[in-house]
Image (cartoon, coloured by chain):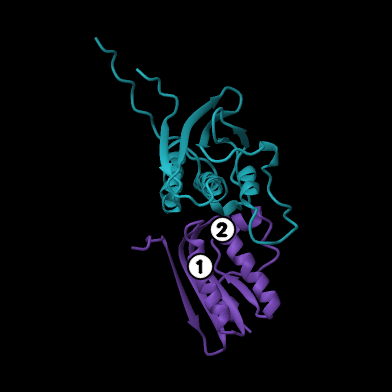
Amino acid sequence: MPDPTPIAVTLKQLPSGQVVVSAKGDIGYHEAPTLRNVIREAYDKKPKGLIVELSGVDYMATPGLATLVEALQISKKSQIPLTLAGMTERVRAVFEIARLHTVFRIVPDLDAALAP
Amino acid sequence: MTPVTADLRLQVVSNPRYLCAIRELVAVSARQLGFAEAQCSQIALAVDEAVSNIIKHGYAGVADRPIWIELTPTQDAARGPGVRIVIEDEARQVDPGEIKGRDLDDVRPGGLGVHIIREVMDNAVYERRDHAGMRLTLTKLLSSPAKACDAACNCVPHQPAPQPPPPPPST
């Protein structure tokens, strides 16, 4: 039986050609591979843009950061814009401690990410 | 009778499925010692990063090796109350001087755990254990604020939970 992980990640393809990956739960060493798999699935769809929606994530450790840095590298290579939306204060603090808040496009919520 | 050296001592196997339980236990315990929510979250983050490093690098992903976590409240006459957390393993020993975070300007996946631990705790000391494995001692004072939090995150420590009265002397 697979281990239950305290994370749920969904993928939604929008008519605009963008893909939204929404995560809910903790993202630590145990959970990051689940997020990584869905993000890779999203890139495989060759979207016009990838939005990772994090409003349901209250805890992120460095494996989660690493997954998103890896996504950023794919975005740069494939020229698919990556946006992080809805980051909670606690997750934002981890990005700031790692000085990663300046390398991502971070917006307050999904509406802001979808705005032209 | 064996003297009690820590308020909490946990032995857990090196299976990542238990990381969630470890960080919950550490966060709840820190809250009981009077730390604010943002501080509790970051103390739990430091322990989570340390244990993840042991599992990934020390034990190379082998899931049935032991890890011990001890948590003890501290009281410094000049600087006030705090917490000490000791994390030990039987993993391969490394030179403590070589345990470093990567250059933050080098944006790439991985290598951030040690930087996060040192940043969110007041002190983090790695050392070799006598016979096998490594020991990491983490300390944090109640008066030391959470890192990178703004005024909205409520990082002012609340009052410690009231202590139960001491038991009556045995007759």
Percent from the top left, x then y, of residue A28?
A: 51, 56
Percent from the top left, x then y, of residue A90?
A: 55, 56
Q: Which mark is residue A49?
A: none
Tell me the chain of label 1: A
Kindly identify which residue carries mark 2: A63
- Horizontal placement of B87 versus B2: left or right? right
For residue B103, above or below residue A13: above
Tell me the chain of label 2: A
Quadrant where the N terminus of chain A lies?
Answer: bottom left
- Mark 2 belongs to which amino acid? Pro
Q: Nearer the viewer, residue B98 or A93?
A: B98
Question: Would residue B160 be visible to someone looking at this image?
Answer: yes
Kindly identify which residue carries mark 1: A35
What is the count of numbered marks?
2
Q: Residues within 10 Å of mark 2 (few under 14, many from 20)?
A: many
Which chain does cyan denote in the image?
A: B
Q: Nearer the viewer, residue B163 or A17?
A: A17
